[in-house]
Image (cartoon, helix red, strand yellow):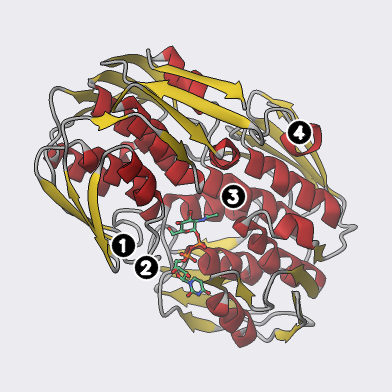
């Protein structure tokens, strides 16, 4: 593992990916740890003194950015390689998250809960005060205010303070992943009991709660939409060891690669239990799945069949699967409709798929995809992490060589996507632009 923010090596800044249709894929892929879990585990390490040992940490840029953020706050972070990261927290923390790191990564917001409850104060630099770009944090703020925190806003920062948070009954208007995480981590040191109703219950939130429990936190209802956190004495949590949950979105990426290429893959460490809804719908499209002792086997015996998808909070179809699903539908038989219920208008990658010959119409938060037998190679751009992975999958379904720019987005969340695909037979390379 490289600590890529500091070395800049392999940061993907000037890299491109070239990928061609290769026909059936075969072999084993080890599914790395989940980005959307490990970043929150790292942030939660601010809660307790001692040395945390995290394993199954993916080698991705966002881990390096979170490491830099924790260092800026006062923790020592060591990236040891082979998926191991240690975080040493002496308690000498400066509860300030600097702009240049926060602006790079949404998950920086996850230091809010731990720093406020631990230090009684936090200042997060962010564009537009309480509006984090186009993604608001009103639920995070309302929840912390209900626990006694006061917020103030500058042009480019938000600040919060409190003597000690107190337990509160909080009902989320929507099961926000980030708000649930910030409120759980804040409640661990609150005075009294906090209940979170309509909480998000993604596998990555279960992972975070289990991490907090290993640190000594008292949390009931883990894995349900009602969490009950009994605050413990401030400073009483301790460092622990923890293995990051496998990444269901990366697992789905290799499933999508197999789906459009044909063949059979063994996905080591994939947790079918975390992907039940999407696997059911993939079966409807003609994919076959078989549980393995340490993962999941996927086989793609023929052309995919179209079906409709709608994104929803867990256990529904995750919005992060959507670019992969749209790509699969682009080459499936029939017409499929994809409805986005979490981030309306998040269809930027559709233009890129159209460049490759996909027949897609968007209307508000719906995309109607009429499958074509084959896509045709072109130069396309990765606009974000998941859209970038979808471009790679689309390239596997296209005649000719597809070139993908914007690879640094893929590197933010994918651990050696190119190498993993090469090892299962894909014709894919990475090169400097
Ligand atoms: C996390 C994931 C992201 C995933 C998303 C939904 C990380 C780093 N990111 O993002 O990959 O797509 O969950 O599964 O884990 N909202 C508000 N007010 C708030 C908070 C959220 O209106 O205070 C809205 C958002 O704008 C969005 C929806 O709620 O429309 C979902 O957001 P949320 O579940 O909080 O997602 P994130 O935690 O940002």
Q: Which quadrant: the C terminus?
A: top right
- In the image, is the residue at mark 1 within 8 Å of ligand 1 by its beta carbon? no
Q: Is mark 3 on a helix, strand or loop?
A: helix
Which of the numbered marks, if any, corresponds to residue 340? Answer: 1
Q: Earlier in the sequence, mark 4 or mark 2?
A: 4
Mark 1 to mark 2 CA distance (whole Å):
6 Å
Query: As drawn, is 162 to the left or to the right of 331?
Result: right
Q: In front: 34, or 128?
A: 128
Residue underneath mark 2 = 344
Which of the numbered marks, if any, corresponds to residue 211? Answer: 3
- In the image, is the residue at mark 2 within 8 Å of ligand 1 by its beta carbon? yes
Mark 1 to mark 4 CA distance (whole Å):
35 Å
Residue underneath mark 4 = 8
Residue 37: % across, % down: 54, 48
Q: Look at the numbered discs 4 and 2 and tell me whether their residues touch, using CB distance below 8 Å.
A: no
Q: In this view, does 384 lie above or below 298?
A: below
Q: Which of marks 3 and 1 is nearer the N terminus?
A: 3
Q: Earlier in the sequence, mark 3 or mark 4?
A: 4
Badge 1: few (under 14), some or many (20 or more) residues near its Cα, within 10 Å?
many
- In the image, is the residue at mark 3 within 8 Å of ligand 1 by its beta carbon? no
Q: Earlier in the sequence, mark 2 or mark 3?
A: 3
Say which of marks 3 and 4 sits in front.
4
Residue 158: % across, % down: 73, 77
Q: Is mark 1 on a helix, strand or loop?
A: loop
Q: Which quadrant: the N terminus?
A: top right
Badge 3: few (under 14), some or many (20 or more) residues near its Cα, within 10 Å?
many
Say which of marks 2 and 3 sits in front.
2
């Amino acid at each position: 593992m490289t600590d890529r923010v500091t070395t800049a090596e392999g940061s993907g800044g000037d890299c491109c990916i070239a990928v061609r249709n290769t026909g059936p894929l075969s072999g084993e892929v080890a599914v790395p740890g989940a980005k959307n879990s490990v970043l929150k585990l790292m942030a939660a390490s601010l809660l307790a003194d001692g040395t945390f040992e995290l394993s199954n940490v993916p080698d991705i840029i966002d881990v390096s950015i979170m490491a830099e953020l924790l260092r800026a706050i006062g923790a020592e972070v060591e990236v040891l390689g082979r998926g191991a990261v240690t975080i040493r927290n002496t308690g000498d923390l400066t509860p300030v998250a600097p702009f240049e790191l926060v602006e790079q990564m949404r998950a920086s917001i996850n230091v809010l809960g731990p720093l406020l409850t631990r230090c009684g104060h936090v200042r997060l630099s962010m564009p537009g005060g309480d509006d984090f770009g186009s993604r608001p944090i009103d639920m995070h703020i309302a929840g912390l205010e209900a626990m006694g925190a006061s917020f103030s806003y500058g042009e480019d920062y938000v600040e919060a303070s409190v003597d000690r948070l107190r337990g509160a009954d909080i009902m989320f208007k929507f099961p926000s992943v980030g708000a649930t995480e910030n409120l759980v981590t804040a409640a661990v040191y609150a005075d009294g009991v906090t209940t979170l109703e309509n909480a998000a219950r993604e596998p990555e939130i279960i992972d975070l709660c289990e991490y907090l429990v290993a640190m000594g936190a008292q949390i009931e209802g883990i894995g349900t939409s009602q969490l009950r956190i009994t605050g413990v004495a401030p400073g009483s949590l301790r460092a622990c060891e923890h293995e990051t949950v496998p990444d269901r979105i990366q697992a789905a990426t290799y499933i999508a690669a197999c789906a459009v290429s044909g063949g059979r893959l063994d996905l080591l460490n994939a947790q079918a239990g975390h992907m039940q809804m999407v696997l059911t719908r993939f079966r409807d499209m003609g994919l076959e799945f078989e549980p393995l002792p340490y993962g999941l086997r996927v086989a793609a015996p023929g052309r995919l069949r179209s079906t409709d998808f709608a994104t929803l909070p867990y256990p529904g179809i995750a919005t992060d699967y959507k670019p992969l699903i749209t790509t699969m539908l682009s080459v499936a038989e029939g017409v499929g409709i994809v409805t986005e219920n979490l981030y309306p208008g998040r269809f930027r990658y559709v233009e890129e798929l159209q460049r490759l010959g996909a027949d897609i119409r968007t209307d508000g938060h719906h995309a109607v995809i009429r499958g074509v037998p084959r896509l045709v190679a072109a130069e396309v751009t990765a606009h974000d992490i998941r859209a970038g992975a979808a471009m790679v999958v689309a390239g596997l379904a296209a005649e000719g060589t597809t070139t993908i720019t914007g690879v640094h987005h893929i590197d933010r969340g994918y651990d050696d996507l190119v190498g993993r695909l090469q090892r299962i037979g894909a014709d894919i390379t990475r090169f400097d632009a």
